[in-house]
Amino acid sequence: MKKVMGHPSVHVRIGELLKLNFEKAVPSKLIEFVANQDDWKKRTRELRYLGWEFDARCAKGANGRVTSSYTLHKFLEWPEDPTGWIRRYEKERAVKGKAANL
């Protein structure tokens, strides 16, 4: 866990946490803690751009509160700069989307 928390990339922190718990549900509160940022849900979803596959589930507990968790099913090796790679992917996707609307 110390290795996970020490990484500067939020994507790697989240991804390594999910990898540590491969095929096991990881509570969203733990992902939020590891990400240490408000937009952790988006950062988690962005892992799909890298070919990762995971489920997000919600469940109502005995106390009536709804909790969510993420379960990783497939991951690929990290690119050299995961966050930079994701940003470039999003930029290219936006350009393609604008071109399709012309």
Image: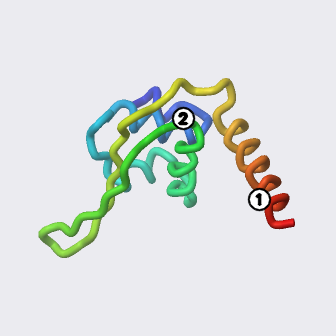
- Position of the C terminus, as image quadrant, is bottom right
User: Which residue of the protein is positioned furthest toward the right in this rendering?
Assistant: 102
In this figure, which residue is indicated by the disc labeled 1? 97
Residue at (72, 37) in percent of width and height = 84
Residue 83: image x %, image y %? 66, 39
Give the x, y percent position of residue 86. Answer: 67, 42
Does label 1 or label 2 sit earlier along the sequence? 2
* Inter-mark Cα distance, 1 to 2: 27 Å
Q: In this orientation, which residue lies closer to the viewer: 8 or 80?
A: 80
Asked if 68 appears above or below 54 in the picture, the reply is: below
10 or 97, nearer to the observer? 97
Tell me residue 70's x, y (percent).
36, 49
Residue located 33% across and 45% down the image? 71
Figure coloring: rainbow
Q: Within 10 Å of the Cα at label 1, are there few (<14), some (14-19), or many (20+) other Cα atoms? A: few
Q: Which residue is mark 2?
A: 12
- Of labels 1 and 2, the one closer to you: 1
Q: For numbered disc 1, what is the local secondary structure?
A: helix
